[in-house]
Amino acid sequence: MSTIVPTPEGELRIERDFVDVTVAAEPDPNWVYTDQHGHEHRYHPGEGDHYPTLVTVMDEPYWCPDCEEEHQFDHLECRLCGEQISPGIRPGTPRKVPGMWAAYLNDEPISGEHADALLAAARESRGRP
Ligand SMILES: [Zn+2]
Ligand SMILES: [Zn+2]
């Protein structure tokens, strides 16, 4: 994305990158599941535990010949009956955050400090009658 600002020294262009930080999958907030024993499980929004009705159980560690190290996974179970449960997921919501930016004065690259000074000067000159 580029922004063009006229300044007393010429045309200032700011190019800003946006970095895609979309995750492949995220918890589905609408997930509800009733297990074999009639216990209801759902996603709880907010800061705390999203799955208060489930408990994390570590699996048996195993030796992975590919990585030459031990791996250990975990899974979620119903707190009450121990049924293994995989909470619903959905594709990640597209999300972009501002990344690097670069400034150009009349198409010549300039430093960030120079750009800041030009922006301040442009604001000032606009403020004058
Ligand atoms: Zn491995
Ligand atoms: Zn249960």
Image (cartoon, rainbow, N blue to C red):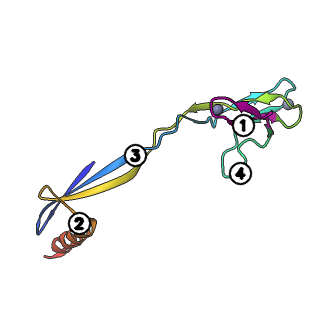
Q: Residue at x 28, y 48 (%)?
A: 1
The amino acid type found where label 1 is placed reads: Glu
Give how far apart the Cα atoms at labels 1 and 4 are. 30 Å
Side of 70 relative to 3 (left or right): right
Q: Residue at x 50, y 38 (%)?
A: 93
The amino acid type found where label 4 is placed reads: Gly
Side of 102 relative to 7 (left or right): right
Residue matched to label 2: 115
Mark 2 and mark 4 residues within 8 Å of each other at the beta carbon: no
Percent position of residue 62, x then y: 76, 32
Tell which circle, 1 or 4, labels the residue nearer the N-terminal end.
Answer: 4
Q: Nearer the viewer, mark 3 or mark 1?
A: 1
Q: Callout 2: few (<14), some (14-19), or many (20+) C-alpha neighbours within 10 Å?
A: some
Tell which circle, 3 or 1, labels the residue nearer the N-terminal end.
Answer: 3
The amino acid type found where label 2 is placed reads: Ala
Percent position of residue 116, x then y: 26, 69
- Identify the element where label 4 is drawn: loop
Decide if ligand 2 comes within 8 Å of the CB at mark 4.
Answer: no
Give how far apart the Cα atoms at labels 2 and 3 are. 22 Å
Q: Is 102 above or below relative to 76? A: below
Q: Nearer the viewer, mark 1 or mark 2?
A: 1
- Identify the element where label 3 is drawn: strand
Counting every numbered tag in the picture gives 4
Residue matched to label 4: 48
Tell which circle, 1 or 2, labels the residue nearer the N-terminal end.
Answer: 1
Residue matched to label 1: 70
Residue 75 picture quarter: top right
Percent position of residue 54, x then y: 79, 38
